[in-house]
Image (spheres, grey):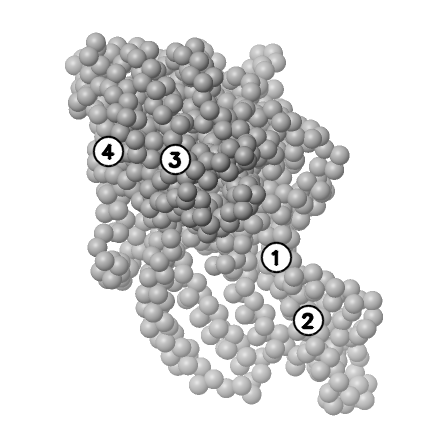
Amino acid sequence: MVAYALRRLLGLVPVLFFVSFVTFGLIRLAPGDPVLIVLGGKKVDPATAAVLREQFGLVGDPFSQYIAWLGRALSGDLGESFRLRQDVVSLIVDRLPLTLELIGLSMLIAIAVGVPLGVLQAHRRNSVIDYAGSLLALIGLSAPVYFSAIVGVLVFAVWLGWVPAFGAGSDPLDQLHHLLLPAAALALGTIALTSRMTRSAMIEALTSDYIEAARAKGLPERTILVKHALRNALIPVVTVTSLQVGFLLVGSVLVETTLGLGGLGSLITDAIQNRDYPVIQATVLLLTVAFSILNLATDLVYGVIDPRIRLG
Amino acid sequence: MFLLNDRRRLPALLTALAIIVVACGGTAVSSPAASGAPGGSGAPSGAPKMGGSITVAVEGEPASMDPAFDYDFVSGLAVDSVTEPLLKFCENDTKLCPNLAESYQVSGDGLTYTLKIRHGVKFHDGSMMTVDDVVFSLNRIRDPKLASYVGWMLANVADVKAPDASTVVVTLSKPDALLEYALAATSAHVVSKKFVEANGDKFGKPEVGSIGTGPFKFVEWKSGDHQKVARFDDYWDKANGGPYLDDITIKILPEPTTRVAGLQTGEIDFIINNIPSDQYATVKAINNVDLTFTNSYYGEWITFNTKKAPFDNVKVRQALNYAFDKKAVRELFYGAEAAPTKATLVNPSLWTFNQPEWQAAWDQLPAYDVNLDTAKRLLDESGVAAQLNGTEIAYYESTPSIKGAAEAFIDSMGKLGIEVKARKVTYQENVALQFGEHNNYDILVASWGSDFPDPSGNLRPNFASENIVAGGANSSAYENAKVDELLAKQNTLVDKAERAKLLIEAQKLIAEDAPVIVTAYPGWPLAVNKRLAGYSVSSLWYWASLFKDVYVK
């Protein structure tokens, strides 16, 4: 399994080269001169613009610009943000933890609500709980995350005053209080998907022969549900849920901008809007790595849940 | 990536929702018009109190704490509290008052500015400000290698010297009517030579910040989240009021609806400028918040690319001016009392000198009030009306009045049987068009506000042909030799009456050539929690130390 993981990680190297090359080209094809955008809609002295262009490494043909960028990147220097005038690596290091906390909390909420809900729905098929769960899933899947975030702010912050309207808080407890709303808004879609997956996988498991056998043995319903049916139903749930981390990452871009969280997501939004090439380049590479490792981790978890799956 | 673009459509949708959900039974919007004089002053009630913390919301991450890179509407809130300029704008921005310089004199030929520097001013690290710091600061902004965003303001400066311990002499290579204003902007903020040299590249960045002589000192800047400044107790000008507040947090909140929600929950105390017009009704409905408007030097307009057919034809441009109902659009977005426009970007609040002459000129200016018959006649006379079909108007959707003006323009063209297409871009792409090569659009919705309290600050950047280049603001690519001559000449004069005469003449020629449709002179919106007092906001708030005299009631 270790050899398998190493091989997969090695395969990441050419992918990263390819992605960096394509990103480099694509962002330069997008309309809008970054120098003019950095200067933010005000008068620019042509001499100043020229110096900035030089500082930003935007002189010469794009291919030699790429080679120059690659040379620096390989030595660990990902450059400086055009707009924020800060080192890209330290920007990412500053901002990544908040996004990870947000996604982690979101995932926790999604699993803690989604899996039990799905089990309950499968257990009480066609009951009020089942229909209510399906309705919730429908809403969760169709409401865009920025929309649920804003509705959440209006209801829970403005009306009820339970949570702050924005921001990330300072100490851990305060931070949990602040992140509850954004994480819940972000989790809605994943709750929906997780509960639907759990429900259908559980229904399938519950109608299989070994469950009949377990029932015939007189095992308590709880044991049948959790120990036998759920464990077997988990594989598709794990696949779908872990792939959801990717969607949570994308969703965090929206929820962070909407709720004023200074994480990686708002950094990406800002960078793309402002044609901040070095930041876009670095964050896209980071996301590539994140997605690849996520997929690998999912494959490895299969082996843990179902020992019949051998990786090698 | 399309998701990100989709976000542009978000504000309208959310606002509709916010108004439905929150402002049920709220008051109707009254005017955001630029009507009152110096706006939004928190009437003092009793003696100011020391202490208290406030939170201010801004829409984006500040560029830097370094004044050299403060040339936008968000960086200045912290920068102008920490570092200070030599002079400051006062009396509703019509005059310059002493600040770190006690006085200044201009030589008869307009080439030498002699500044007396104030003694006894302390930097936040306890060291005294000296003339060396002043000379260092001005030369730093002028240094091409720094690429300061405000370096152009000192472009005509040839030399800066300190002949003695209380005098700084600024020598120009040629007279520059705008130089005195540059002494009150971030281009003349005094930084500590010792601190800047010690920190090198890190100066102004989150890990180091900045020190200055201002009423508040830099505390922290958490990238993407907030900046924080705290009261400086050794402030030199304490005798004239504040600082009173313990500290100020400047919170980055890109989403307008969230900023407004922050006002509702009381988590946000103060928002200047960053309130879209479609949120005015919601903000007005909040009990503990005052929404006021300050005159601005700002204008919004539709600009024709005069280098492209058929917009190179003056009759076409005049016809389109007559076809567009400016009043309807203005009132829709800025209320019934919104200041009426004429065919100039110099709105009445920019008449900072020789006001009677400007008033007389204003009365003569065409307003191009909507008249479809005149529009049709002019189009027929032009003979090129057919070429208008299929032209594109570029605009962004995040500012309601910009989007509204573009949609109304397409509509009014439709009434003439002309099909103009919408070219939707992001705000940043629009910036790149307005300040780019000026050759890659037909029509554009543009906006601009003078950096200085001077009519030339709106006329020269937008209409002198030297600014058709990349980085220049002449978005209509307007070229008129006579206008060029007048605008260049007035800039070399110190006599204001003479300057007014030349500027007024240029204004008239531009109005007749109609390179733009002026749609609005929006005021600056300011929302403040009622627990605050002592604030005053002027047209040039972006160069001002806004929080010095603010206190919690």
Q: Is residue B191 visible?
A: no
Evaluate if marks 2 and 1 touch, with contact meaning CB atoms under 8 Å apart.
no
What residue is disc 2 on? A196
Q: CA distance from mark 2 to mark 1?
A: 18 Å
Q: Does mark 2 fall on the same chain as mark 4?
A: no
Mark toward the viewer: 3 or 4: 3
Q: Is residue B492 left or right of residue A228?
A: left
Which one is closest to the eye, mark 3 or mark 2? Answer: 3
Cα–Cα span, label 1 and label 3: 48 Å
Q: Disc 4, disc 2: CB below 8 Å?
A: no
Q: Is residue B145 above or below residue B538?
A: below
Within the image, what quadrant is residue A29 found in? bottom left
Q: Residues within 10 Å of mark 4 (few under 14, many from 20)?
A: few
- Label 1: which residue? A144
Q: Nearer the viewer, residue A123 or B108?
A: B108
Query: Do the dots labelled 1 and 3 sit on one chain?
Result: no
Q: Is residue B455 above or below residue B315?
A: above
Disc sitting over residue B197 in the figure: 4
Q: Nearer the viewer, mark 4 or mark 2?
A: 2
| Residue receiving disc 3 | B314
Q: What residue is drawn where x is 68% and y is 73%?
A: A198
> What residue type is disc 1 on?
Pro
